[in-house]
Amino acid sequence: MLEVIDLRKNYPDFNIQLDFNIKQGEFFSLLGPSGCGKTTTLRLLAGLERCDSGTILFRKKDITHLQPQKRRFGLVFQDYALFPHLNVRENILYGINQKNKSEKEKRLLEMLDLFQLISLKERSIRHLSGGEQQRVALARALAVKPEILLLDEPFAALDPSLRQSLREELKELQKKLGLTIVFVTHSQEEALSLSDRVALLQEGRIIQVAEPFEIYTKPKTEYVAGFFGKVNFLELTVCKKTLSWGNTTVDIDLEDGSYLLAIRPEHLTAGTGVKGTVTSSSYLGFATLYVVKTVFGLLHYLELDSGSIKPKGTEIELSLKKAVPVRKTA
Amino acid sequence: MKRFTGVLFLALLIVIMLFSLTCQAKEVVIYSYDSFGQTLMEMMEKYMAEKYQAKVRFVLFEDTGAMYTRLLMEKKKPQADVVIGLDEVYLVDAKRDDLFRAYKPKAFAQIREELVFAKDFYLVPFDYGYITFNYDSELLPKPPKTYAELIKPEYNKKIVIPNPTTSSPGQAFLLSTIAYFGEDKYLDFWKELKKNILVMPSNWSLAYGIYTNGEAPLVLSYGTSPVYHLVYDKTERYQALVLDQVSWAQIEGAGIVKGAKNPELAEAVIDYLLSLELQEALTESQFMYPVRVDAKLPTSFRIAAQAKEILNRRLDLQEIHDKLEQWLKDWENVMR
Amino acid sequence: MWQFFILLVLVVVVYLPLGGLFARLLALPNLSSLVFELFRDPSLLKALQFTYRQAFISAVISLLVGLPGAYFFSHYEFKGKKLLRNLTMIPFILPSILVVLAMIIYYGQQGFFARTFNTKTFLYSFSGIVLAHVFYNFSLSIRIVGSTWEKLNLRLKESAYVLGDSPLKTFFRVELPLLWPAIAYATLLAFLYSSLSFAVVLVFGGISFSTLEVYIYTLVRRLDLKKAHLVAFIQLIISFFFISVVSFLAKRTEAVDKAFSTFQAKPLRSEKRWWIKSLLFLYFAFLFLLFGGPLLALLVRSFQNRDGIFTLANYLNLFSPKVERILGLPIWQVFLNSLLLAAVSSTISVMLAYVLARYFPKLRPFFLIPLGVSMMSYGFGVLLTMKNWLPAPILMVCTQIFIAFPVVYSIISLGLEEINPEYALAAALLGSTEKEILKNIYLPLLKPALNSAFAYGMALSLGDLSGVMLVGEGRFVTFTVALYRLIGHYSFPEGTALGTLLALLFIFLFILIEAQGGKNHA
């Protein structure tokens, strides 16, 4: 539905260059650390920034130079940017240009109903909680029936306990209305749990676009792997589809050669293989994360359902369940 | 914040010190307007200090109107001893308001007689100047010589006159037209003059500024104005003219405030004001004529315009006082 | 408690003299007949009508002229911006006699403008009055509206764009409602200043146009003080009516501070739309042609002798014995006096305004009252109530506060409204003391407003004659006193040089102060 082809925007110390496409009804996340260009990308999609070159196609139509007013995209900013001089009702009605009063009223009621805002209808923006403001912002953006909804870190300003429930609401809403959503976030957790596909950005480029499961389990580069939680990176040699792992060998489906392998802490288990000693531990509740000193250096190892916490200095032997080759990032 | 407040207090202190330096004990207080010459003030200070061991404190006002209203407000508790610079038109008001004490100065016999506007010396004249037109000879080679010529179309939008309702010279000129044409004819003159007037600013300063900046070649000012340009700019470009050889004279008076704390010193000030020394000094300080017949004029005064007749005496001061408001109203109606 | 003490200070400075003046007036036994007599005078009614008509037109045009400037100043960063912003304030600093003269030199029948565009004597008419008032007041809307606009959250505008509104529609639906209070107050100030105009109206309007101020002055000249004060009182009531209406209409909704954050103006060179750049260029060319011209003419004149030949003599003369003779003191002392008085009184005004705006927001209309009467009437009040028991330096500062306070207050109180009170609340919860909150939150956020307020305070005080003369009695010579004295002694060329020096000094000073502010931000 939306195709972004070689879109470029240059800044004195920073360049953006993008290629990606979004399907109808998809929940698409732009993930990356602050300063990677994800918000700028969103603004380019909304038409609030002008690109230097490249094309944006929407339903095969070139909208690269179309004004934001004519794109009919919905946009929710991180701070919501609700109009403070208007109340809830007026905010929601803002974008509706319909002359027909009853149509307008109908749409308003739909939105109020959808976001459970009926009782807040006449309330001033000042007297809304963070979660309520977010709902009003969504309602305002959706009231005009946008083709695509662009969300810029909509949960960033909320407290963690609220985030969880609103996240679920958003996902449900998307399913219910069949929305196409472009979602900008710096939280890998949000991206993984909500998205149909995730695009990971680094310094203005997309490094990998994939479904959450794939991007987590098959990261293309060292950077991608490292972005989603703790990873052990080891440079190892594969010989005849096997990998030498301490006292044992592990089968691996790779051609012969030297690889940089990403090994997640949970893919190490107690068993036979590499010996080491525990140098520190942190208890996470559902699991314990250890740092183990081995011949490969320090390795992170996650133990689920452990009966007790191993004290520092405990001897331990780790076997390898899974390793993913990644491209080295300069 | 603290440093800020500190700086502030220091600054306040300096201001206070600057003030306290200038205010001290036993002194004669003289009220005057702001353009009263610094030279004359210093001469008076010196004289009073040497002769009477008295200090002189000058209090200067924005204009004579402000000075007069201050006197009125302080009537119950007078602060001033002497007032310098009220022109004769204030005489009737001053008598009604009972502000001054008459004092016949020692040099009364030397004062040019027609200038003595209060025969009882309720206010004592000390200088005067003819209210006449000045012209810029470079912009206007052919100046008018008579009232009749002044209203000719060739002077269309070439005249600046300070507004008679707000300025003393302007009011003096209005009075001179009443004196010259008579109460029933002066408005006819103004009806014609109106076309030639470019602008009537609120005060003389602005009018004269407009003139010297070349916007208009004719301005109502003083007969002595060209003297300044001769002395300081060394030019005779600016000239004065007396229409039909007659002119109104602005006569400035001085008076001793009734209930003054230092009446003897006040009398000494008035006498010094009329001394030959000061009378001769005021010519190139105030650019006004001295009232003493025996005072010598500096050579620069050759360029000053002098009238054969002073129009003032054609009107009675009481009459002016009673009718001025109506005259101004009638005049305004014509000029609108 | 101390807040009430500050309030008391203002009451003594402003309301005691005015109250004293008008209380005496209201106690007159023949008050009703006096009022009756006044209102039977058709010229008073005419003056009333004309005063507020011209003030309204002047204020609206000032706003329209200043609004694009407010936009450009708040949205773009470009070279010479600070210089330009301070240049627009020069009419406020220069005494009216110089401003009027500058306009005549430029627009008058012999002026460059009139000769180039063949406009003849349009200056000496109603349009001349309005032009002069716009010249004075357009900087108010540039500065007051600009500093609000500068802080307006950019994303509000962008939200409106995305929701389908054109920039123009967005301006009317989003920006205008949020800028409205600033616009209303800038216009109110321009309106009230224009309504107190005196010299401008007489010069350009002649007899055909008379304002209340002229009417009062004429009454004072005729020594009809009671009537003069009565008209001043009527003037005050009318002004207060307008002030109240505006503060009612411009009441901000309580959530409005959410609309403001500190968004930085972007460099002009990164603006890609060529037409914006050309509009900006055209606008400043227009300002330069209309208002830069008179100032430039004055500058040129200060370097000419009477025959139009280039000379430095006017400047050198300022330091000559001749000028010292006229002024009674050396010129450097004049500058010292002026700057000291202006800086001290402007600082006090800013501090008073900050406290009063923060702790007594509801009293706003009352704080603007000094705009309703001229220095002349206030001066009478001072003579009646305070002259005898307050030392001269304090009285002097009082008169300057009277002049400076309303503008200083307006700027600061608008600035305060744009600060989210939650910042202060959060800081208080974190255990910050009042002093820390002031230092860490209000001062940095208010910096632009404080700068503007201080600049206007200084400018207004530097341009004052009546207040200084009233208390200083001719011995405390400030720049304006010196200027009038020079002009009174035929020294007009030296006067223009003095005016130019002061304007340059002022601009230099404020570019320095603003640069300081910038550093503190970072």
Image (cartoon, rainbow, N blue to C red):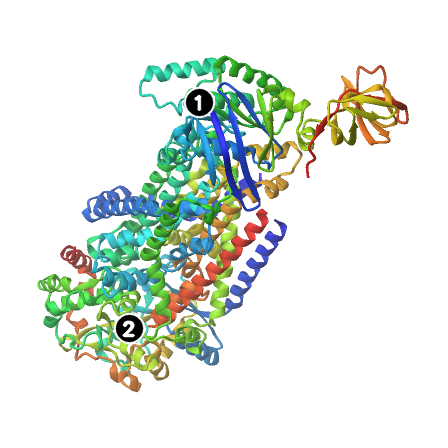
Q: Position of residue B21 (x, y in %)?
A: 53, 67
Q: Nearer the viewer, residue C150 or C385?
A: C150
Q: Residue at x 49, y 53 (%)?
A: C346
Same chain under badges 2 and 1? The reply is no
Give the SS element for disc 1. loop
Classify residue A297 as left or right of residue B100. right
Q: Which mark is residue A181?
A: none
For residue C390, say whether it is visible. no
**Neighbour class for label 2 at 10 Å: few (<14), some, many (≥20)?**
some
**Neighbour class for label 1 at 10 Å: few (<14), some, many (≥20)?**
some
For residue B285, say whether it is visible. yes
Residue B108 sits in which quadrant? bottom left
Q: Nearer the viewer, residue B327 or B88?
A: B327
Determine which residue is flagged by label 1: A147
Classify residue B140 as left or right of residue A221. left
Q: Position of residue B259 (x, y in %)?
A: 39, 64
Determine which residue is flagged by label 2: B121
Q: Which tag is nearer the camera, tag 2 or tag 1?
A: 1
Give the SS element for disc 2. loop
Q: Amino acid at mark 1?
A: Glu
Q: Residue at x 15, y 56 (%)?
A: B330
